Amino acid sequence: MTPQYEERMQADLDKVRRKFQTVAELVVNQVRDTIQALIGWDRDLANTVVLGDRQVNRRIKEIDHLSHTFIIRHAPSAGHLRFASSILRLNVALERVGDYASTISREVLRLTERPPEEVAHDIELIAQQASHALTEALASFFEEDVDRASAIHDLVRPIDLTLRTVLDHLVELADDRAIPLKDSFALVRINNLLKRVSEQADNVSEQAIFAVTGKDRDPRIFRILFVGRENNRASQIAAAYAEKAFPQSGVYSSMGLSPTGALDPALIDFMDRRGMDVRRTKPSLIQITTESPHPYHVIVALGEDVLEHIAQVPFRTIVLEWSIDIPEGFSEQLLDDLYKLVTFRVQDLMKTLAGPDAH
């Protein structure tokens, strides 16, 4: 590659970078303005945000064209190719954030009255957290700072706790008729859209890491809880099998609604013969808090009438019910049938979460 050609390629890349930085700043301002429109009850500003989404879309379309042209014209490799491909993916993230900001402003325009001060304060808190995460993620990309990008996930995680508190507050106000029912639905949607802004910040940080290193962020380790009635058979089998079959994809535990004192020797022997040592495992009482900094990704209720006893869970936790017929007893045939049913469901769950190559 001649110096002249390399200079031309760098100039084209710098042009893409400048235009992307401009649209990134525009989208961040859109998020800021849409929240200001809500807090300040500024309908003109809300309309401005809605109209501004068209400008965001036009600029993103232009960057898409420039990025594709750059790849076709220069056939880049290594860092230049990673940067261009990351820009294309980041365009999708920014377009979505712009759409979220526009939709929030449309919800503001539909409100029948100004939100109570405490509600506006709650929403402002989530908006500040989400905006900060997005700004930091974009900065990590432009500055090629892998450590900064890796820290974004820790900025996003507390938003779940804040959102749960805010949504509970909105429900209380709606029950007390402190805000119109129509407005309460709009405010709930606004909060959920701000949560999505933070999720896009997480996606931006992943692309920042890829652009610099060529590697994706470390695969997610899923925290999974299996809940049974007595935590002495199916839930124990599920957790032990998941740990053996998918040790790198998750952290597994089991609990019960009314746990027995100890595991039956027949179950211990049965699992021993399949290469799983559960003799040091004791049935434990279910304990789930919505304020945990490391919530479960998935909670699985095994058996009849277990799900109804799992009340409040963290906002991002998925609760599944496996309707598995679990007869009484610990005979070899019964345990073998139960083992086959449970392990099949565990395999299906983990391949859904971590992909077909989960291990």
Image: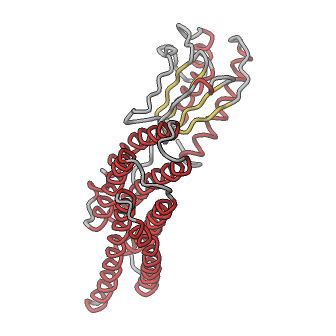
Up/down of 104 relative to 15, above or below: above
Q: Which residue lies at the image location 44% right of the left edge and 32% below the top edge?
A: 290
Asked if residue 197 lies left or right of residue 225, the reply is left
Q: Is residue 248 left or right of residue 155?
A: right
Nearer-the-camera pick, 309 or 67: 309
Q: Position of residue 9 (x, y in %)?
A: 33, 85
Residue 104, above or below 154: below
Query: Residue extending furthest bottom?
Result: 4
Nearer to us in this view, 230 or 72: 230
Left-right relation of 234 to 197: right
Classify residue 263 by image quadrant: top right
Depicted 70 relative to depicted 165: above or below: below
| Residue 334 percent across, percent down from the top left | 73, 17
Q: Residue at x 34, y 52 (%)?
A: 124
Q: Write the residue at 67% across / 31% down.
A: 322
Residue 323: percent from left, percent from top? 70, 29
Residue 21, compared with residue 202, is above or below; it is below
* Residue 95 appears left or right of 259: left
Image quarter (top left, top right, bottom left or bottom right) of the N terminus: bottom left
